[in-house]
Image (cartoon, rainbow, N blue to C red):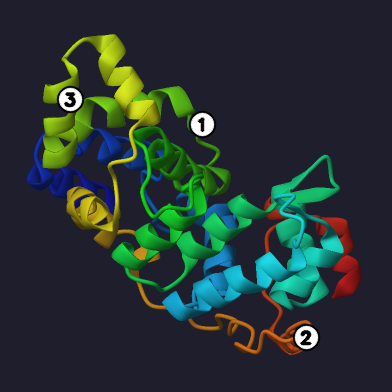
């Protein structure tokens, strides 16, 4: 099954990077027929909604988001969510129920993380896209703390599908301890600054030393564990196509109502969804 494969993958990855692999294993321990992943149907539903997205589709969607959220609020209303994704109402209700805050708005960065995680883009492509979402400086470089935020967001999306809890403090601690062993540039920076805990914490939070090259050095520590996840597979049968890459003023056309993706009552606004059937 997936769990023994994950354990073997972790052992092959070695000590460096194993902390995040263990966290991933805890958040998504298995995806077999009797797993909560399958039983509550949230993960498989999100795969059918976004599994057909490829890397260019992620960036096209992000460009459209920038148009819709022109003032950069970081949040989307139900109407804006509909304009962004062009999904049938049945599927929009599922997403809004799963991700909305106080039943009124959706965090756009969490939404983009969700689309990215469940897309068919390769792991490296997903990493680069997510890095752009969490680089507060817009310089193409991140701090260790921003990479931790990125990791928490991706793990948090999966946790919504399994009921696991992901804590920023825990993931940040893992990365702070493992980054020196994974990234030579980070290790050299710590040598120059000093080895005290306070210096390491300051470096982790403030120094922008993780660019695409460093990201490409980090991801192999997760690759083997990632490869046994459903997320690494091609789009599942029945996956909805992403909206056309026509980013004019008009919203993308909604997918055909016949292509609606059903979901479990555990994953969405069941009464409203039944009313739409």
Query: Disc 1 or disc 3, which is closer to the eye?
Result: 3
Query: Disc 3 or disc 2, which is closer to the eye?
Result: 3
Q: Which quadrant of the rendered structure holds the C terminus?
A: bottom right
Contact? badges 3 and 2 (CB < 8 Å): no
Task: Determine whether, in the image, residue 96 is placed left or right of residue 49.
Answer: right
Question: Is tag 3's residue or tag 2's residue first in the polypeptide sequence?
Answer: 3
Closer to the camera, 53 or 84? 84
The residue labelled by disc 2 is 257
Question: Is tag 1's residue or tag 3's residue first in the polypeptide sequence?
Answer: 1
- Against 83, is 110 above or below? above
Image coordinates for residue 113, horizontal then vertical, percent:
53, 56
Q: Which quadrant of the rendered structure holds the N terminus?
A: bottom left
Q: Residues within 10 Å of mark 2 (few under 14, many from 20)?
A: few
Among the 4 quarters of the image, the one containing residue 2: bottom left
Q: Which mark is residue 165?
A: 1
Image coordinates for residue 232, horizontal then vertical, percent:
33, 66
Label 1, label 2: how many angstroms apart (C-alpha)?
Answer: 35 Å
Among the 4 quarters of the image, the one containing residue 272: bottom right
Q: Would residue 183 be visible to someone looking at this image?
A: no
Considering the numbered disc 3 on the image, is that residue within a helix, a strand or a loop? helix
């Amino acid at each position: 099954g997936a769990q023994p494969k994950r354990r073997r993958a972790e052992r092959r990855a070695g000590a460096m990077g194993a902390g995040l692999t263990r966290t991933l294993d805890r958040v998504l321990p298995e995806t077999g027929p009797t797993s909560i992943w399958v039983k509550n149907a949230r993960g498989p539903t999100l795969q059918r909604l976004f599994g057909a997205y490829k890397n260019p589709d992620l960036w096209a969607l992000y460009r459209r988001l920038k148009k819709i959220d022109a003032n950069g609020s970081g949040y989307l209303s139900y109407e804006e969510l509909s304009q962004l994704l062009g999904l049938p109402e049945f599927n929009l209700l599922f997403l809004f129920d799963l991700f909305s805050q106080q039943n009124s708005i959706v965090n756009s960065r969490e939404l983009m993380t969700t689309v990215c995680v469940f897309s068919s883009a390769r792991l490296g492509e997903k990493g680069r896209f997510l890095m752009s979402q969490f680089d507060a400086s817009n310089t193409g470089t991140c701090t260790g703390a921003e990479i931790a935020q990125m990791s928490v967001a991706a793990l948090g999306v999966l946790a919504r599908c399994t009921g696991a809890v992901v804590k920023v403090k825990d993931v940040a601690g893992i990365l702070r301890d493992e980054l020196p062993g994974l990234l030579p540039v980070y290790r050299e920076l710590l040598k120059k600054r000093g080895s005290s805990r306070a210096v390491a914490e300051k470096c982790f939070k403030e120094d922008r030393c993780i660019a695409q090259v460093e990201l490409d050095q980090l991801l192999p520590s997760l690759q083997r564990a990632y490869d046994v996840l459903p997320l690494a597979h091609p789009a599942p049968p029945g996956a909805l196509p992403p909206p056309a890459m026509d980013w004019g003023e008009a919203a993308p056309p909604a997918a055909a109502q016949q292509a609606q993706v059903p979901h479990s009552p555990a994953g969405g606004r069941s009464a409203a969804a039944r009313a739409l059937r």
